[in-house]
């Protein structure tokens, strides 16, 4: 019974561990001022890891994410505001570095495509229902051979 409990306990520990735990685990990477470190973490949660693409740089363990975290902290240490740090990274990597890219002409298709797909689906359903849908085709009449076979099967079923 003990052997079965060990894998279950390990699995539970892995599932309960917070995601990205240890992403900024190196104390040398952190800023000495707690207020500046909090700002750096807040900014890092707004920036996309360019390797992982669905994680912030604060949650990612990728080497590039670590480099970006260090760059954010370097800019904060230099006295940049939050907006200036983000503007610096946007100028360097484009809007893709933002986890929530702005609505612009270039990103309009990305932002509007879910609504357009939903509207197209609703329109298609409405058109099919409006037409009444296709009437089911009448079945073809049975051939004489099929009628004889059906009569034989019905006779067997009655017995």
Image (tube, rainbow, N blue to C red):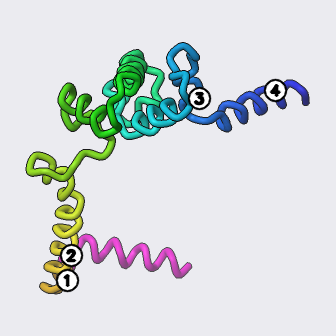
The mark nearer the N terminus, 1 or 4, is 4
**Given this view, does label 1 or label 3 mark the residue nearer the observer?**
3
Determine contact: label 3, label 2, CB under 8 Å: no
The circle drawn on residue 21 is 3
The mark nearer the N terminus, 1 or 3, is 3
The circle drawn on residue 80 is none
Please determine whether, in this image, residue 82 is positioned above or below residue 92. Answer: below
Determine contact: label 1, label 2, CB under 8 Å: yes
**Residue indicated by mark 1:** 129
Residue 154 magenta: yes
Q: Residue at x 16, y 78 (%)?
A: 128
Helix, strand or loop under label 3: loop
**Given this view, does label 3 or label 2 mark the residue nearer the observer?**
3
Magenta region, mostly helix, strand or loop? helix
**Residue indicated by mark 4:** 6
> Distance between the Cα atoms at labels 4 and 3?
22 Å
Residue 79 magenta: no
**Is 58 situated left or right of 16 in this image?**
left
The mark nearer the N terminus, 3 or 2, is 3
Helix, strand or loop under label 1: helix
**Given this view, does label 4 or label 2 mark the residue nearer the observer?**
4
Q: Which residues are magenta?
A: 138-159
> Distance between the Cα atoms at labels 4 and 2?
53 Å
**Residue indicated by mark 2:** 125
**Given this view, does label 1 or label 4 mark the residue nearer the observer?**
4
């Amino acid at each position: 019974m003990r052997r079965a409990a060990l894998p279950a306990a390990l699995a539970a520990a892995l599932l309960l561990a917070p995601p990205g735990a240890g992403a900024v685990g190196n104390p040398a990477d952190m800023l000495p001022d707690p207020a500046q470190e909090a700002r750096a973490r807040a900014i890092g949660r707004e920036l996309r890891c360019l390797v992982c693409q669905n994680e912030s740089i604060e949650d990612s363990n990728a080497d590039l994410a670590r480099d970006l975290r260090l760059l954010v902290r370097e800019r904060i240490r230099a006295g940049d505001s939050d907006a200036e740090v983000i503007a610096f990274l946007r100028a360097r990597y484009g809007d893709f570095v933002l986890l929530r890219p702005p609505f612009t002409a270039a990103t309009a298709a990305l932002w509007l495509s879910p609504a357009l797909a939903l509207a197209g689906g609703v329109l298609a359903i409405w058109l099919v229902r409006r037409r009444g849908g296709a009437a089911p085709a009448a079945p073809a009449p049975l051939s004489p051979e099929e009628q004889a076979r059906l009569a034989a099967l019905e006779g067997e079923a009655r017995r």
